[in-house]
Amino acid sequence: MPPISDSWPDVNASLNALESDYADRITSMVSFLQPRFTQIAQYASSLHPTRLPCRIITDRYTWGQSFAVFEVLFNDGLSWIIRFGMRPMDVYFNTAAQLERKILNEVAALRLVRERTTIPVPHIIAYHPIISPTNPLGPDAPAFVLMTAMTGVTIGEYGISTGGPGDPLQGDETNRPILHRYLRDIADIHVQLSRITFDRIGSFVLGEDGHVTIGPGADYGLGPFGSAKEYFKIQADAYEKLAEAELEAFEAESSDPTARLKRQFVAALWRAAIMPLLDDRDDKGPFPMRHGDLHNENILVDSTGHIVGVLDWDCAGTVPWEAFAVPTFEVSGDFADLGGGTREERLAVHDLFNRALVEAQDKSALPSGRTLADLHNSNAGHVGAYLAYWMFSMACDYDQTGRALHDIIGLPDDMDLAFQRFVAAK
């Protein structure tokens, strides 16, 4: 069997597509690790059941925002994956404290998923969440996680596009059964995670006794929260701070002198939209477990569309039901609002997923009486889960996210007139 990393994107092409500062974070990490790969391989071999020799494949690696990722290949063909925490991107993101929370959160999350569900996930072999004298790879070695590898491909390898607007089958009707199976499996994952609940909102902490509890959020260390309203208030506050910030990249790309005011207006719309949609009966929990970064690149499938692996659980945590409602933007018909394309095509995926959700969910409902399918179809789910994702990633975008919020609130005015009144009142 060929190495798993053979199917990873070309390293040089991927690096060339990045901004220089981001690419440097990756290449400097690889340069630091290069003279240490032999020691890392020896450590991995010591953890193999029969201590087989292995090597780190260094010419084909990948990465995300927080980790550089390498394949560990044993002489018998067995593969493991080792992820190394990269240096901070700025004073806020991927700090040592944040990286430690993310690693400990992922370890605990995978423990929960393996114990309480049938969702296929990696098995943790070893980890060390900080740079310290006790790091088995050396006192100056980066934080790391060593885990089993999972085989499979993304749904895109079969010519199915779930990550954007338009026809997901791209005109190939022979792939429809694959898409159907894929959506049914996501619905099953969604239902299984809904059954893992805690009485607080936050990220997972694994105690020395193996018991999992809820602690502060892995991303920015906020919480834990005891109610949905408290969680969404903090989220709304964060969007308003984002809107008010000196976002040089966005300002440089815009010739609109009101760009920042428009972001502030959209942040105010999000707060005004979400708060009336919260149901008091679900406000105090229990709260379900969410993956937090579930999209096609983190989901592996076989040739039938059956999901054989779900990766990257470092963003997992418990959330309000409204934030849980849409497991991935790829199964929301409202994606047409933010990406163009044919709305009927996106709604077809939305409805197909919703039917699968109805079939997968048992008779139980939330304290409010709502079902997962109800939430997926609701304005509460649209704002709390779907638009919340775009609020951050699109930096409170006026023309797309803002107009979607304006329509949901049902304001009687034209949005541009509403914005003018917002400016006049400041």
Image: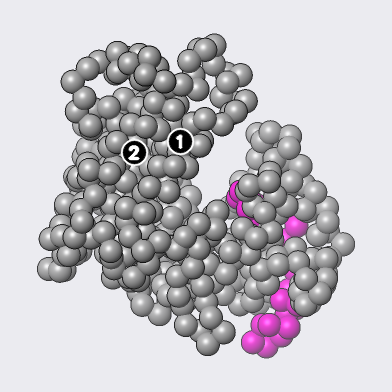
Q: How many neighbours does mark 2 have within 10 angstroms: few (below 14), some (14-19), or many (20 or more)?
A: some
Which residue was labeled with disc 1?
A: 240
Whether label 2 touches label 1, CB < 8 Å: yes
Which residue was labeled with disc 2?
A: 271
Task: Kindly tell me whether residue 7 is visible in this rendering.
Answer: yes
Relative to residue 188, is residue 219 depicted above or below? above
* Viewer-nearest residue: 369 or 302: 369
Relative to residue 412, is residue 377 depicted above or below? below
At label 2, the amino acid type is Arg
Residue beneath the point at 50% across and 22% down: 260
Query: Quadrant of the rendered structure where residue 380 is?
Result: top left
Highlighted magenta segment, given as a residue range: 43-72
Residue beneath the point at 46% across and 21% down: 261
At label 1, the amino acid type is Glu
Element marked by disc 2: helix
The N terminus lies in quadrant:
bottom right
Residue 68 magenta-highlighted: yes
Relative to residue 7, is residue 346 depicted above or below? above
* Viewer-nearest residue: 164 or 385: 385
Q: Earlier in the sequence, mark 2 or mark 1?
A: 1
The C terminus lies in quadrant:
top left
**Residue 196: mark in rendering:** none
Residue beneath the point at 22% across and 17% down: 413
Q: How many neighbours does mark 1 have within 10 angstroms: few (below 14), some (14-19), or many (20 or more)?
A: many
